[in-house]
Image (spheres, grey):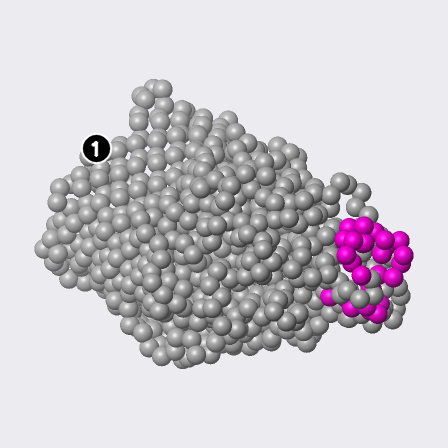
């Protein structure tokens, strides 16, 4: 039967729309069996019991995405993405995606159905993930997103879902592309180019070789050029004046008083709502970067050799290098106390007069002075991050008596080198003892000579590497035995893989000599996993199909786990299908959660100190505070169970609708102690807040906060995925395609400790209720044009359920929803030439501002919308 005829027949009985796919060979144009994400059984009818979203090459192009991360950010099934542009990140330059509102570590990323090595550095110092920036978008032929737990099929990290990227198969010819884009403000220029060449036809020539090369470069995006972020004075959005005290600097003589701005400010001083007086120099106006300069290139080759009619050898080799240069603002002196007689203590009569003019009660030579300021004379807190990723697969497939066999070995790895511009703790010491190599840095003035800082500068190099070695043997049969509904399918296999991670901080970091950073430990860890699995596809009746799967994993460091899965699809009538699944999962602690101490900085409002000083909660200022989390060798694995139930409707050929409900429950969730919970409820965590020395009866400044890892409590989330599509034929006038995708959370409950009550986090900043994407595409002859509306939900103007509601005084109760529009076009003036382009955020819409965040500058929705209107053009030519 011809492909077109059979596809139309299947569509008529309601099987198309959410996962139907087919492939044909060139010789006979016959349907071949393919494997869809979520199963190991090859089938012709690929629509089954699991909700799989499939994006083809053309679908990807019309999103206007230039990277994998930008593509995923347009999908409602992806709850959040991290693009790798944050200079304070543990993983600068790396990117990942999350599903179901859960962390990225619960989403499994595959390339052609196989694992990749995780990024050698971990998100937040704990969470392993696959760097999406190592996957050039141009070589991706399709993306399959399984919106369902798949631990029984793929392993314990497929809790929230699976994203499988697939490359071209049996391709002949040459495919080239070029892309250019930039923001309407003139920054963020990006250029990309690539070529893919395939030769040999498997059926005619007995082999196929695909080789591709891709290069991508983007210039920085600057805060100063974009209205949403050009100033840290967010009062224009109903927020606070968040211009940094440290940009110019501040001083005080008592922890009970606010900081005064350093003398000699050449602008009128500004008193913020908290009562703090600052010199209003705006860091965001100083050509600071919101997105860094990035360069990536990658090569990929796939060779398939046909041995006979039923057997093939295959090889896949890939290499990608990504380099990101992040300008991370100023290094800074964080609450350093000077005593009389210290080298940097003020003695100049003019300076003392200026200080007394600000605070008449200041007694020089008697009062201690605490200073806080950025080192804007020296080098910034910049990072040069280089990531090299390699991937190789060697395999053999054969068929024997209707059985399909596949054996493969997989070697992949990632090496990361971060060169960080730091200052050593000897700079802090020199403020007391003096600079033996030159003048002592004077924190009260600007324009210090370079020689006062350069002796303490250090270009520290931190390296890390990860590797994956894997072996898999599997067998499947599409027609094992007959049942009333048709032949039963079966798949079984064994897997073994070994993961390693080596993290080697610079010697200065290991010895604790880097200013504003705790000692970083060397780590060399590994573990191995052996797994066996089996899967049945059982058509129990003509309209009832059941999937049964069972997987057992043995971790050499955490023992055994067995995870079953059952799924079904039921079609009471040809226009309606019900589907559902239930499964369990297991997530072992990461190497760093077990063994490594990490240090980060976060914005913290010290409510207890503010109350002691008579400062109300809503005026309590946020300060950058050191957060120390320690490894815990007593951690236990997380366990979870998930459930889904949905309905697919196709009353007529061109109308499709689906609704899928899901619920995920987690136990023994591993997290660092929640920082906001510690600050809001300090008595609940004795010893967590460590303060600096102070006078009796007064609370000193916070030195650091301990947030160790623990099996904190639990998580329970549920929601709906809704998809509605209509293809409207306009006859000789073309075709109109309308689609609306909606992801809605119904509940997101957690508890910080096992002894805590459950808290509903839904409708707070951590979990807005919904995300919606509507697309309309008109096509006629060689032309097409599309409009996409991306909408993001409103939410309470609080971070989470435990947030201090007193901070809302005078502020809006809610952060409003917002919608951004994108347009795209495609034209094919020649058979082999396709030109496309578009505008993202065509209305130059500013995302809604989260005015009550303790982290200033937090907006809703997509980060790229902060860049304003963005233009792009693509050219694709096939030889």
Residue 330 spot, x, y in % from top left: 71, 55
Left or right side of 177 for 409:
left
Relative to the observer, which residue lies in front, 122 or 698?
A: 698
Relative to the observer, which residue lies in front, 806 or 672?
A: 806
Q: Residue shown at 85%/53% (left/top)?
A: 353
Query: Looking at the picture, does residue 563 appear above or below residue 863?
Result: below
Q: Is residue 339 magenta?
A: yes
Residue 168 seen in the current view: no
Residue 246 spot, x, y in % from top left: 70, 53
Q: Which residue is mark 1?
A: 652
Left or right side of 770 for 10:
left
Decide: few, some or many residues near mark 1? Use Cα within 10 Å; few <14, some 14-19, many ≥20.
few
Q: Is residue 338 magenta?
A: yes
Which quarter of the figure has residue 574?
A: top left
Query: Looking at the picture, does residue 640 appear above or below residue 146?
Result: below
* On-image quarter of the N terminus: top left
Q: What is the span of residues highlighted in magenta in the rendered image?
A: 337-363
Left or right side of 584 for 526:
right
Tell me the element at label 1.
Answer: strand
Query: Looking at the picture, does residue 122 appear above or below residue 186?
Result: below
Q: Residue shown at 57%/76% (left/top)?
A: 523
List the single residue furthest toward the top. Answer: 732
Q: Residue shown at 41%/54% (left/top)?
A: 801
Q: Residue shown at 66%/37% (left/top)?
A: 225
């Amino acid at each position: 039967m011809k492909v077109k005829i059979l596809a139309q027949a299947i569509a008529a009985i309601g099987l198309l729309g959410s996962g139907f796919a087919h492939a044909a060979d060139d010789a006979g144009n016959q349907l071949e069996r393919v494997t869809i994400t979520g199963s190991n059984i090859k089938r012709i009818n690929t629509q089954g019991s699991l909700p799989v979203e499939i994006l083809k090459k053309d679908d990807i192009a019309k999103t206007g995405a230039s990277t994998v991360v930008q593509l995923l950010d347009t999908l409602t099934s992806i709850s959040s993405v991290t693009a790798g542009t944050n200079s304070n990140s543990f993983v600068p330059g790396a990117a990942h995606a999350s599903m179901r509102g859960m962390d990225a570590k619960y989403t499994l990323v595959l390339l052609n159905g196989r694992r990749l090595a995780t990024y050698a550095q971990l998100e937040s110092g704990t969470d392993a993930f696959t760097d999406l920036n190592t996957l050039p978008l141009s070589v991706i032929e399709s993306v399959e997103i399984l919106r369902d737990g798949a631990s029984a099929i793929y392993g314990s990290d497929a809790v929230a879902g699976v994203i499988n990227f697939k490359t071209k198969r049996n391709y002949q010819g040459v495919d080239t592309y070029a892309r250019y884009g930039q923001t309407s403000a003139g920054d963020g220029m990006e250029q990309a180019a690539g070529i893919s060449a395939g030769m040999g036809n498997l059926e005619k020539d007995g082999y196929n070789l695909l080789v591709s090369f891709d290069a991508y470069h983007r210039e920085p995006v600057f805060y100063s050029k974009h209205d949403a972020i050009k100033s840290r004075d967010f009062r224009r959005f109903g927020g606070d004046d968040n211009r940094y005290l440290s940009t110019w600097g501040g001083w005080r003589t008592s922890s009970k008083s606010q900081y005064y701005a350093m003398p000699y400010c050449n602008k009128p001083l500004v008193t913020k709502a908290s009562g703090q007086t600052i010199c209003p120099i705006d860091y965001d106006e100083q050509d600071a970067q919101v997105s860094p300069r990035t360069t990536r290139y990658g090569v990929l080759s796939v060779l398939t050799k046909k041995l006979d009619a039923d057997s093939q050898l295959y090889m896949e080799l890939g290499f990608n290098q990504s380099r990101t240069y992040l300008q991370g603002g100023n290094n800074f002196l964080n609450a350093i106390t000077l005593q009389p007689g210290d080298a940097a203590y003020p003695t100049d009569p003019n300076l003392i007069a200026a200080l007394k003019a600000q605070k008449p009660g200041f007694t020089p030579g008697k009062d201690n002075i605490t200073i806080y300021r950025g080192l804007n004379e020296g080098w910034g807190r910049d990072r040069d991050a280089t990531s090299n990723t390699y991937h190789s697969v060697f395999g053999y497939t054969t068929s024997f008596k209707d059985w399909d066999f596949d054996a493969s070995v997989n070697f992949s790895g990632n090496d990361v080198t971060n060169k960080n511009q730091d200052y050593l703790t000897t700079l802090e010491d020199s403020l007391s003892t003096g600079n033996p190599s030159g003048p002592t840095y004077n924190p009260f003035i600007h324009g210090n000579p370079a020689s006062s800082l350069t002796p303490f500068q250090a270009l520290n190099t931190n390296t890390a590497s990860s590797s994956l070695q894997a072996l898999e043997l599997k067998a499947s049969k599409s027609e094992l035995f007959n049942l009333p509904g048709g032949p039963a399918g079966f798949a079984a296999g064994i897997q073994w893989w070994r993961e390693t991670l080596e993290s080697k901080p610079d010697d200065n970091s290991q010895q604790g000599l880097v200013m504003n950073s705790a000692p970083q430990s060397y780590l060399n860890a590994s573990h191995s996993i052996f797994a066996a699995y089996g899967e049945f596809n059982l058509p129990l009746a003509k309209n009832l199909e059941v999937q049964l799967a069972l997987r057992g994993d043995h971790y050499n460091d955490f023992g055994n786990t067995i995870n079953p899965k059952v799924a079904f699809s039921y079609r009471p009538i040809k226009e309606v299908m019900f589907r559902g699944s239930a499964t369990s999962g297991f997530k072992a602690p990461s190497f760093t959660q077990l063994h490594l101490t990490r240090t980060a900085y976060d914005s913290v409002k010290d409510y207890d100190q503010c109350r002691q000083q008579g400062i109300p909660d809503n005026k309590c200022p946020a300060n950058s505070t050191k957060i120390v989390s320690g490894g815990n060798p007593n951690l236990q694995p997380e366990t979870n169970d998930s459930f889904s139930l949905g309905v697919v409707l196709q009353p007529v050929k061109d109308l499709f609708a689906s609704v899928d409900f899901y619920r995920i429950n987690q136990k023994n969730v591993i997290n660092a102690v929640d920082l906001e919970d510690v600050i809001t409820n300090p008595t609940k965590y004795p010893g967590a807040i460590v303060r600096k020395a102070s006078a009796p009866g007064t609370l000193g400044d916070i030195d650091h906060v301990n947030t160790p890892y623990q099996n904190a409590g639990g998580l329970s989330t549920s929601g709906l995925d809704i998809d509605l599509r209509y293809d409207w034929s306009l006859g000789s006038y073309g075709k109109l395609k309308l689609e609306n995708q909606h992801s809605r959370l119904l509940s997101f409950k957690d508890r910080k400790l096992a002894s805590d009550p459950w808290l509903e986090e839904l409708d707070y900043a951590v979990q807005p209720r919904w995300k919606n994407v509507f697309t309309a595409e008109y096509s006629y002859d060689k032309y097409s044009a599309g409009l996409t509306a991306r909408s993001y939900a409103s939410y309470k103007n609080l971070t989470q359920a435990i947030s201090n509601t007193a901070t809302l005084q005078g502020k809006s109760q809610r952060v409003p929803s917002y919608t951004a529009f994108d347009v795209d076009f495609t034209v094919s003036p020649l058979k082999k030439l396709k030109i496309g382009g578009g505008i993202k955020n065509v209305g130059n819409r500013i995302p809604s501002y989260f005015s009550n965040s303790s982290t200033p500058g937090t907006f809703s929705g997509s980060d790229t919308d902060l860049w304003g209107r963005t233009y792009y053009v693509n050219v694709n030519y096939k030889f």
